[in-house]
Image (cartoon, rainbow, N blue to C red):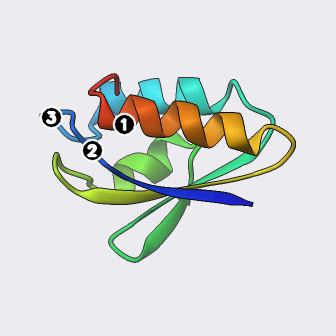
Amino acid sequence: MREANAVLQNDDGLHARSAAQFVRVANQFVSDITLVAKGEEVNGKSIIGIMSLGIYSGQEITLRAEGEDEDEAIERLSHCVENELI
């Protein structure tokens, strides 16, 4: 399992469009993806789960990946979250 913390830089937070973009990137990987925020864990490939967290800009989240491409998944998702790509 690989884990990384990232601070969300998207000004609008993880709303519907950015959550959908996150899920689109997460689904490119075989690994299981988990997103942790505010003490809650959700499936990183579930738009409903991600939106239920209500994550705003500037909040720190934890990304977890477990599987054969976990390193690449964490690197890519962290980069997207921290560089306003999501």
Residue 49, x across and y down, in percent: 48, 52
Asked if marks 2 and 1 touch (Cβ < 8 Å), the reply is yes
Q: Is 13 on the left-hand or right-hand side of 78? A: left
Determine the residue positioned at 83% across, 48% down: 67
> Which residue occupies 37% across, 58% down?
61
| Residue sitting at x 41%, y 29% | 80
Query: As shown in the figure, which amino acid type bears the numbered disc 1?
Result: Val
Left or right of 6: which side holds 64? Answer: right
Instruction: Check disc 2: other Cα within 10 Å, few if <14, some if 14-19, many if 20+.
Output: many
Q: Residues within 10 Å of mark 1 (few under 14, many from 20)?
A: many
SS for dot 1: helix
Q: Which mark is residue 11?
A: none
**Structural distance between the alpha carbons of marks 3 and 2:** 10 Å
Reading the image, the residue beneath label 1 is 81
Q: Amino acid at mark 3?
A: Asp
Q: Nearer the viewer, residue 28 or 52?
A: 28
> Tag 3, which secondary structure?
loop
- Cβ–Cβ under 8 Å for marks 3 and 2: no
Q: Are marks 1 and 3 in contact (CB under 8 Å)?
A: no
Look at the picture and state if 52 lies above or below 69.
below
Q: Which mark is residue 8?
A: 2
Residue 52 in picture, x, y percent from top left: 37, 56
Q: CA distance from mark 2 to mark 1?
A: 5 Å
Quick one: quadrant of the C terminus? top left
Q: Which one is earlier in the sequence, the residue at label 2 or at label 1? A: 2
* Tag 2: amino acid: Leu
Q: Nearer the viewer, mark 1 or mark 3?
A: 1
Q: SS for tag 2?
A: loop
Q: Which x, y percent locates residue 12?
A: 15, 34
Observer-side mark, 3 or 2, equals 2
Residue at numbered disc 3: 12
Residue at image coords 51%, 36%: 77
